[in-house]
Image (cartoon, rainbow, N blue to C red):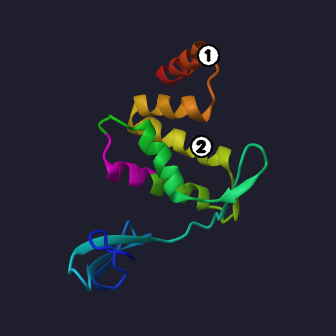
Amino acid sequence: MRCPVCGDDQDRVVDSRSVKDGRAVRRRRQCSVCEHRYTTYEYIEPSASSVIKRDGSREPYDREKLTRGIVIACEKRPVSTDEINALVDRVESMIGENGEREVPSERIGMAVMREIQDLDQVAYVRFASVYRHFKNVNEFLDEIRGMLK
């Protein structure tokens, strides 16, 4: 791990604890050079290691990519980083329930849509517009009407 202040990779762990119901480890580290303290998180790799894309191609599962998509949908909305991380944790739990090594991107997208709808309706519409590839305003309005029912 590189120190965010001086960039050196010599550090020591000064505290370590389990977080997120045992699904992650939080470590407080101290740089051996400048003595700056910082926090890192280690996540248990979900059982799904590959995502099957719509076109049939496969790519490694990437928690950060999933989180970025949700962060973009929640931009300028009253949604905290902790709420987004909790949402990602729930989605990972859902997609890892059956222990499959490959998960269709559609299953991940639908899990996010179920979770984000309860979190923030505007973020839900933003995520849905990208996920479902709306082609025109009518498709957008249909989604909003369905959400309001």
Residue type at mark 2 is Gly
- From the image, give the main secondary structure of the stretch colored magenta: helix
Residue 149 covered by magenta stretch: no
Q: Which mark is residue 136?
A: 1
Work out whether 77 lies above or below 14: above
What residue is rendered at 30% in x and 46% in y?
80
Residue 82 covered by magenta stretch: yes
Secondary structure category for the residue under label 1: loop
What residue is rendered at 23% in x and 75% in y?
37
Frontmost residue, 149 versus 141:
141
Measured from the top left, where is residue 4 in percent x and y?
Answer: 31, 69
Query: What crowding class fits label 2: few (fewer than 14 Cα within 10 Å), some (14-19), or many (20 or more)?
Result: some
Magenta stretch: give its range.
79-87
Measured from the top left, where is residue 91 in percent x and y?
Answer: 52, 52
Measured from the top left, where is residue 104 in percent x and y?
Answer: 70, 50
Q: Which mark is residue 109?
A: 2
Residue extending farthest to the left is: 35
